[in-house]
Image (cartoon, grey):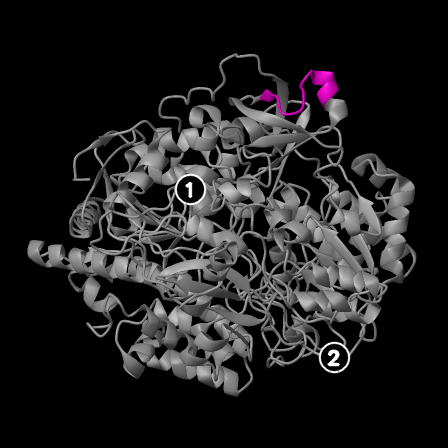
Amino acid sequence: MDASTQNQSRRRFLWLAAAGGAVAAVGIPFFHYRLKAGASVRLGPRGTPKLNSWEDLYRQRWTWDKIAKGSHGWANCRSACAWDLYVKDGVVVREEQSATYDQSEPGVPDFNPRGCNKGACYTEVMYGPSRTSVPLKRVGPRGSGQWERISWDQAMAEIAEKCVDAAVKWGPETIYQDLGPNYDNGPTTAGRFKFQLMAGGMFADMWAEIGDLNLGALMSLGLAHVGGSSDEWFLSDFLVVWMMNPSVTQIPDAHFLYEARYQGSELVVIDPIYSATAIHADQWLPVTPGSDAALGLAVARHLFEKDAIDHAYVREQTDLPFLVRMDTGRMLREADIKEGGKDNLFYLWHPQQGGPVPAPGCEGAGGISTRLDFEPPIEGSWKIMLKDGQEVLLATIGSLLKESLELWTFERAAEVTTLSVEQIRAFADGWVRAKRPMVLSSWGSNRYMHSDLMNRSKILCLMLKGAIGRKGAGLQSTGFIDLEGFGNAMQVEKDGISGRLGVILNLMTPKELFDVAMDITMKRKTENQVAREGERRFETEVVCYSTVTAIDYRYQGIKEPLAKEEDHLLPRPLAAYHEESTRKGWEPDFPRTGAPKVFLTGGSNLLRRNNLPQYLMANMWDDMELIVDINPKFSFTGTQADYILPAAGWYEKVGIKYTMAYAPYLHYCDQAIQPLAESKDEFEIYWLLSRDIERIAKARKLPVLNGCHRPTDWKTLHQRYSCEGTLGPKDAERVLSDIIEQSSATKGMTLEQLKTVGAARYVATGMNVSPAYTYNPDWKGKGVLNTLTAFTEHKEPWPTLTGRISCFMDHPWFLELGEQLPTHKPSPKAGGDYPFQFVSCHARWSIHSTWRDTPMMLRLQRGEPQVWINPADAGKIGVKDYDYAEIHNDYGSVRMRIKFSTMVRPGVAYYYHAWEPHQFPNHQSFKWLIPGLINPLHMAGGTAQLHHGNSKYQAGTAVQDTRIGIRPWRGQSTGAKPVPARSA
């Protein structure tokens, strides 16, 4: 195939672009076959030796040249797993689970074996028909399917030229990268991030936009990602799986739940669907979607009523003893009682002194400890005189909480959740009995408008029981291990020790470094407090940081639809909260020079996952001057791009599976084979791109550009990316070795060792920086990994306003919306008043869209997008099993198959996410119907935990509140409604 233009329909794009490019490419194997370089296909008699029997064929299948160690590095999967990769004639012919894991401690089951159906067939993706193989350039309108094959040299030169043009005209901050959710902790992701950092481009965090950020935990604990190793589940006596389905989404870890149950632990599953996990439970509570907070509040009321709370823990570790002014509803501050007093120094009641005293460890008090030498009351009220002579009534947060819980009787909770009173009572009694209650509530728990209230209510129950920060108890919402070497790899500009020192000095002056060292030495601050301060400086002074939600709200054209959805629910318009937040510097407002102009996408599939993508394509998308998809497989986003660059697959490059705490092992990804066809790993791609940008910048004598926080000189971009030329395009393995060598969690590991064993147990948890928040300084690789003991055992202040687990949100916006304490609010009807609530979940057969078109996985299900509904509902609306139906709401309609299932409660339409839009009729998916509500409280800021940053506080989008109607499809036209011209 030459470089002539291929005119293709969008429907045939994937097949033709993949297959046509592969045939033209040299040496690409499909479905485990390949031609050697320079070989040609000869017709005629086969030259294969004659097989004497079927046994000979079987023996050939079980021979190989080598076994490489690997994992699925860039997969957005929480369950890291070690695999053996069998290679024959340069082809990975199969993958097999590797049972390399040790028992963490006596009496606890080990992790063996780890793996799932997706990992067992990644070769089907790797050699499949949607694999990218050669660089492609769009030659027709975006989305037309008109492409031509080009060389890497041409692709890099043209992309570099357009990047320079955009940076000169609009500024480097308009070069936009969505950070994930697919990434690893190895050199290829470090290379992607390093390019963006060195170029002064914008990092757009997607954690909350995709619904994976636990903002309720952030409000309560100051941490969004909380949780230790999955073998800790085995130690709990009361396991509550709340908005999580480990049997499907954490297949390698689910056995710990069931082994715990065999040993006598009680297992409760709370899910509107009779899930694959629920079938194993002692109790299944099919709550009405969005009513979970009501259930948690009823439990909390019962714990108070039965006096089943840990009083000592609550006094020391929570904010319930803190004092609140009854006239303002705000906490008592030093500024209220002293001239010139602090606004962030708060008070407890001292019974012996008969008055308020400062709370040690709160934000304004400073210090490194929350230890108390007295017992402050959890309940009570008193009168005091303020500095102006005014007498005010004070009450503890505990008193206010207990009063608010009086409303949440079992009967009222039953009305809201549609559970029976008996079900709720049995569940609440389980909490009373529990010695080590544990709640598993992972990323899927964050996708309602009021998910924060639901998660705050769960944490309320746990804190009353004194469970958080205790072994075998607490919250499991997905934790990470930190690799300091990864952060160094994306920032270092020079080789060796001078480069590592440069990373530090890029953030701090020598004097500031000395002051930090003295703060730690003199015990004025803990190492964790210093790390958090440094992280904030990095995000506010170095990185050009924003969020996908913030960018979408400003430029996608969704302000008017969201105003229609939400303004009648709020005291003020949503836009007013956004304006105040950006004016006060809470929510980031980059890029400030206009909408993004260059989109380099590699770890995401934005158009597949974005809510109301028709608005994105009609507004911001068309305004971008360059869109490049760097990807090992074709995606819907790629079909709408200007260039597609083939990235190496996960078995074709070195890497480190991202560092989940569930399995406290580093999972090494070796390069089992060379990259297929013309694909390259991302480290090399950005090496080449930075080289061409620097060449053009020098030729044009480009001036130093103004970045978000500091100037950036593109005439030295490649020099900095390559560490002054010491890193070549093929040096990804060297970068990986440096990451391991420079990380405390991997101390003692070597690349040679990992090539042999594949997975090695961490020896520490690294620094407590985003998103790695284990806070267990005592864990050194032995025993199960439990978390947050720095606060509960070492008595460090929590990273919150009060230095405690926070039940009370002392912020004007929270008071304005009546959410200063955990409460229940009904799920709003997004998309209009329709009879079905449209509830999504992750599928057993794919991780996001990666396996969505894999034939083997499609054969294990019905093979196309479908909506699961209760047969009773189906009878009412006249649809049959496997019929097409029209799914509709205020934004239009799409077509999907119907599947009957009694596992779905009436009134719920249940669907598995991540189908590509081109797998739907009209190439429009359910995302065309989902507005993605934004909670204005998630734009708030100005306090310790309400601090916007990467994997920290930020506005997201809520999809589970969407409502739809369902009617039979009898040939009528379907499709999204037209987008208003230039919607603001």
| Left or right position of 300 against 866 | right
Residue 881 lies in the magenta-colored region: yes
- Image location (x, y in percent) of residue 875: 74, 19
Residue at image position (65%, 77%) is: 369
For marks 2 and 1, the one nearer the N-term is 2
Residue 845 lies in the magenta-colored region: no
The quadrant of the picture occupied by the C terminus is top left
In the picture, residue 376 is in which quadrant?
Answer: bottom right
- Image location (x, y in percent) of residue 809: 65, 53
- Which stretch appears magenta? 874-885
Amino acid type of the residue that numbered disc 1 sits on in the rendered structure: Leu
Label 1 near label 2: C-beta < 8 Å?
Answer: no
Instruction: Find the distance from the CA under tag 2 to the CA under tag 1.
Output: 45 Å
Residue at image position (36%, 66%) is: 187
| Residue at the disc numbered 2 | 106
- Categorize mark 2 by other alpha carbons within 10 Å: few (<14), some (14-19), many (20+): few
- Residue 446, compared with residue 909, is above or below; it is below
- Categorize mark 1 by other alpha carbons within 10 Å: few (<14), some (14-19), many (20+): many
Secondary structure found at label 1: helix
Residue 336 in sight here:
yes
Amino acid type of the residue that numbered disc 2 sits on in the rendered structure: Pro
| Left or right position of 254 against 702 | right
- Residue 178, compared with residue 667, is above or below; it is above
Residue ranking furthest to the front? 52
Q: Which mark is residue 606?
A: 1
Residue at image position (51%, 50%) is: 954
| Left or right position of 283 against 581 | right
Q: Nearer the viewer, residue 127 or 983?
A: 127
In the picture, residue 779 is in which quadrant?
Answer: bottom right
- Image location (x, y in percent) of residue 168: 18, 48
The quadrant of the picture occupied by the N terminus is top left
